Amino acid sequence: MKLQNGGIYLINGTDVIADDGEAKVKLASAGVTTDRDTAKKETMAYGILKDHNVSGNMENLQIKFDKMTSHDITYVGIIQTARASGLEKFPIPYVLTNCHNSLCAVGGTINEDDHMFGLSCAKKYGGIYVPPHQAVIHQFAREMLAGVGRMILGSDSHTRYGALGTMAMGEGGPELVKQLLGKTYDIAMPGVIAVYMTGKPVPGVGPQDVALAIIGAVFDCGYVKNKVMEFVGPGVSNLSADFRIGIDVMTTETTCLSSIWRTDDRIRDWYEIHGRSEEYRDLNPGAVAYYDGCIYVELDKIRPMIAMPFHPSNVYTIEEVNENLDDVLNDVEKRAQVSFNGKVDYDLHSKVHNGKLLVDQGIIAGCAGGGFENICDAADILRGQYIGCNDFTLSVYPASAPIYKELAANGVLADLMETGAIVKTAFCGPCFGAGDTPANGDLSIRHSTRNFPNREGSKVQEGQVAGVALMDARSIAATAANQGYLTPATEFAGEYRHPVYHFDAKIYEHRVFDSHGKADPSVELRFGPNIKDWPSMPELPENLILKVVSEIHDPVTTTDELIPSGETSSYRSNPLRLAEFALSRKDPLYVGRAKEVQKAEKALEAGQCAGEALPELRPVVRTIRSMFPEVSHDNFGVGSTIFAVKPGDGSAREQAASCQKVLGGWANIANEYATKRYRSNLINWGMLPFLIEKGDLPFHNGDYLFFHDIRKAVENKDDEITAYRVDPAAGTMEAFKVRTGALTDDEREIILDGCLINYYRNHRS
């Protein structure tokens, strides 16, 4: 694995010429006469984006997607927002899957209530509804939505179908709302990074191994952040379609914007198997394509990998862990103390038995692990073995009902069950803490997408902590065959059978509701008692007083820490109730602090005195007026803000931002934002995405900040804004600078209006 320092030219899809001082000479000797700007237009990404851009300007894109998809944690909020903004029908195919809140015993009836709401929406607005246990969101999209050259938008961060020639993006719900209302997805033209593959994986190395190796190489340095990863090179042809899919889905963990792969006969065959051969065409970069960087991947040199707790980028080879066990475990335990703020002792050394790491649980599941080839290869390793009757357990979740049926038909299902493994239906629960949660202190190895702290179900604030390590299905099977002792699949000396896959579309034909794009306005939506409308949200005031109510100095703050996953997912149709969980596993005092500050804003909205509702605000206002005497209750608003070094890694869930807004949040302040999608969520919920330079903070938790003429600053497109730390005890105000970063005109208007709902209400023609 090597990262190119600078850009490259790719000649005929095979030869790489670095964009350095010798580039012109080398290009000329190869008979190439192009220039960089022309060659940039020859990437696959550029062509697809151009075909979907309606702005007429390839520097500032306005994208209209072909199709969209959401699951049952996100679609209720999206449709509720769209309804409040004037939704009449789904303008493009919109698939509502039910693969997250499938366990309907959690939270009473509310999960199934959401499902019935989704079905009624598919009927009323003209959509597609996939019942629980039929397919995880991304497998259904691969099987039934993807098409070469198409673009798909999903409200799940792992919306990645690039291996099938489809450029897909995962974003927060408001971006889907824009598409439902006929609007566009607005971004600057992203950079494109080549992933140049050579060689062929050795037996026992699977797609998760390759993906983790890439993530480990690029995450910390931000090499592909908000860029498109374009997979090219001769090594691509040595990978099956399922193998490519398994790598592709994990590109989300690199923080890239999207991904795209060149296609070939293996992808043609994939579409034919799934009865959709019309969706295939050859897709390759042009004769000379320019990339902003390059990741060189030598597939034959990759070995079985493991991402130790608590991040997909915390990667080692399994051999390295086994050979340097004490050092690796020490490092992981030290990292855990940062993640858990020293509140819980995280002990991995207790997992060492007879000098080897003994894990407690194995899971092969979801959009990353639940593919046909992953499960078949795992079964080959396990055949004739037994997982034992001690602590170790193994669960396998095929990603769709058609895959499950084929595993039953070809005998793999029986083989797995004979080993002691439990084979379950399509469900994303293990990935976010709603299924197969390990016991306190346990270590789980999973072929899934993430291993963030708390995500597997533990609650640090209640003394519960477990760990997840990410591995490929093959090495999980090898470990299971060794009854829990960490084992790389390269130690398996047997044969992989590679059975042929047969896709049965009848399962979906007879069970999935498909309106075929025809809306029926006469259908009444079916609401459960937990489905609530969004509360009203005020527009941005002339002046803004913010109290810092949380200060987080972790290197990265995930969306799971901003709004926990797991059992809280049941309340995502209820904005007020869900907000009670905001930062609950990172800063349990946050909600109380934010609600206390919100009293002042509610008083202002009611025409009352903010100081009566929040007495500590009175000296703050007096101090502000000493410098800005024109400031009054008629022209200022009060809210809360948080500081985090780098917030927003992980899930696309809009609730990471909306919960803060529901509690009166008006801004985030950060050194940088981990992902474009989290920053977009802040903006779409009317929150200011402030940036501050790294270094000593000019404020701390509990301080009040004042932003004079903030509304005018947004209207005037000011990037740099003067803020003030208010010290009421001393009667002083200390100035410091923040930036908003690049904002489109529409994004500024959304912030001015207070949120996307207000924006569409105010601009409805």
Image (cartoon, grey):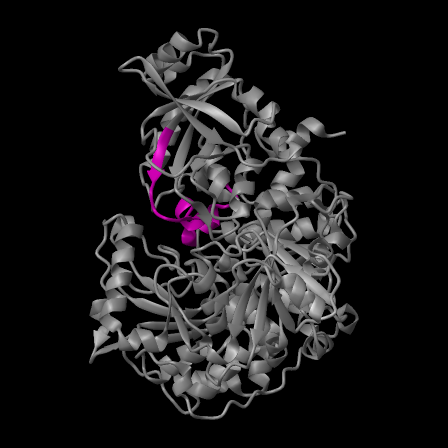
Judging depth in this view, the residue of 262 and 12 nearest the camera is 12
Task: Tell me, yes or no, if residue 583 can be seen here.
Answer: yes
In the foreground, 168 or 293: 293
Quarter occupied by residue 582? top left
The image quadrant where one finds the C terminus is: top right
Q: Quadrant of residue 147?
A: bottom right
Q: In which quarter of the view is residue 85 placed?
A: top right
Q: Determine if the magenta segment contains residue 214.
A: no
Task: Please count the marks in the image.
Answer: 0
The residue at 39%/76% (across/down) is 394
State the image coordinates of residue 491 (x, y, percent, origin top left): 38, 87
Is 661 displayed left or right of 613 in the figure? right
Above or below: residue 427 compared with residue 187:
below
Left or right: 754 with respect to 180?
left
Residue 600 spot, x, y in % from top left = 41, 20
Taking the image as shown, residue 743 lies to the left or right of residue 300, namely right
Find the magenta span and give its range.
Answer: 548-574
Q: Is residue 516 above or below residue 60?
A: below
The residue lying at 35 percent from left, 32 percent from top is: 549
Image coords of residue 580 (percent x, y): 40, 39
Relative to the observer, which residue lies in front, 17 or 103? 17
Q: Residue at x 29, y 77 (%)?
A: 322
Image point 36% across, 57% down: which residue?
457
Q: Position of residue 18 (x, y in %)?
A: 59, 64
Q: Is residue 101 visible?
A: no
